[in-house]
């Protein structure tokens, strides 16, 4: 077996009891793996970060799980974030996790996948996440909006509508293009600074 081309973790931005975004996260992980990309789930329900008292780089007592979360972002070629929309914005648990880090995100391409129970696909949380990632100096380049999540994906993460397969193909093409381009540029910078 050949080594995966890229590593792109999938952040699961919902810890709600009975959460449905996990279906979409499974879809993303499975499709990325099919494309030869290493795509571990960074599930905030498993990582269990406490409310942020201070950022990672300011602490000598990081909470359990934070080092693994930070390393996964820092070593990635790009990150996929699966987020539901809560009250027109970012779930608190996801914002909390993102607030711990900064340099780990530097110049990393990000794919934003938004999830909604209704028909609007989480357009507001998409806009809020886009602005947040730009503030973190990451590069939000690709997006998928999932509407009516309960009927759009089954429990195993299989899409029930053809448009998500086509949407994923476009998403992947853009995300991997930026992963190659930005990865080469970061490597050239690192070599110059050696
Ligand atoms: C606290 C809360 C707020 C919500 N606010 C919105 C919203 O603003 N827009 C929307 O389209 N759906 C909203 N919903 C519906 C969710 O998008 C839907 O329940 C979806 O399944 C949430 O993802 P989850 O199942 O992973 O928690 C909200 C749900 C919750 C629990």
Image (cartoon, rainbow, N blue to C red):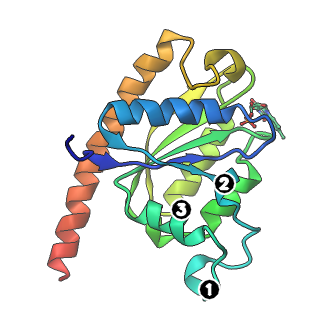
Q: Given the current orientation, which residue lies at the most extreme front position? A: 1
Quadrant location, ligand no. 1: top right
Which mark's residue is nearer the viewer, 2 or 3? 2
Callout 1 crowding tier (Cα within 10 Å): few <14, some 14–19, many ≥20: few
Q: CA distance from mark 1 to mark 3?
A: 21 Å
The one nearer the camera, 81 or 133, is 81
Q: Given the current orientation, which residue lies at the most extreme bottom position? A: 60
Residue tagged 1:
59
The one nearer the camera, 66 or 93, is 66
The label number, if any, that marks residue 135 in the structure image: 3
Where is residue 12? Give x, y as percent. 61, 45
Vertical arrangement, residue 35 with respect to residue 185, above or below: above
Which mark's residue is nearer the viewer, 1 or 2? 2
The label number, if any, that marks residue 46 in the structure image: 2
Callout 3 crowding tier (Cα within 10 Å): few <14, some 14–19, many ≥20: few
Vertical arrangement, residue 186 with respect to residue 123, above or below: below
Instruction: Report which quarter residue 36 is drawn in.
Output: top left
Secondary element type, mark 1: loop
């Amino acid at each position: 077996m050949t080594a995966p081309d890229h590593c792109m973790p999938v952040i699961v931005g919902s810890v709600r009891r009975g959460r449905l975004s996990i279906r979409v996260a499974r879809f993303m992980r499975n499709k990325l793996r099919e494309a030869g990309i290493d795509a571990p789930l960074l599930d905030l329900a498993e990582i269990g970060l406490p409310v942020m008292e201070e950022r990672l780089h300011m602490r000598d007592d990081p909470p359990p799980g934070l080092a693994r979360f930070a390393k996964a972002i820092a070593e990635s070629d790009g990150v996929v974030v699966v987020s539901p929309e809560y009250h027109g914005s970012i779930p608190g648990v996801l914002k909390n996790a993102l607030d711990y880090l900064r340099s780990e995100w530097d110049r990393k391409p990000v794919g934003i996948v938004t999830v909604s129970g209704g028909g609007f696909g989480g357009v507001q949380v998409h806009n809020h996440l886009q602005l947040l990632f730009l503030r973190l100096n990451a590069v939000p380049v690709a997006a998928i909006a999932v509407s009516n999540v309960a009927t759009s994906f089954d429990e195993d993460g299989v899409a029930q509508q053809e448009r998500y397969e086509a949407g994923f193909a476009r998403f992947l093409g853009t995300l991997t293009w930026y992963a190659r381009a930005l990865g080469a540029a970061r490597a050239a910078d690192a070599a110059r600074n050696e």
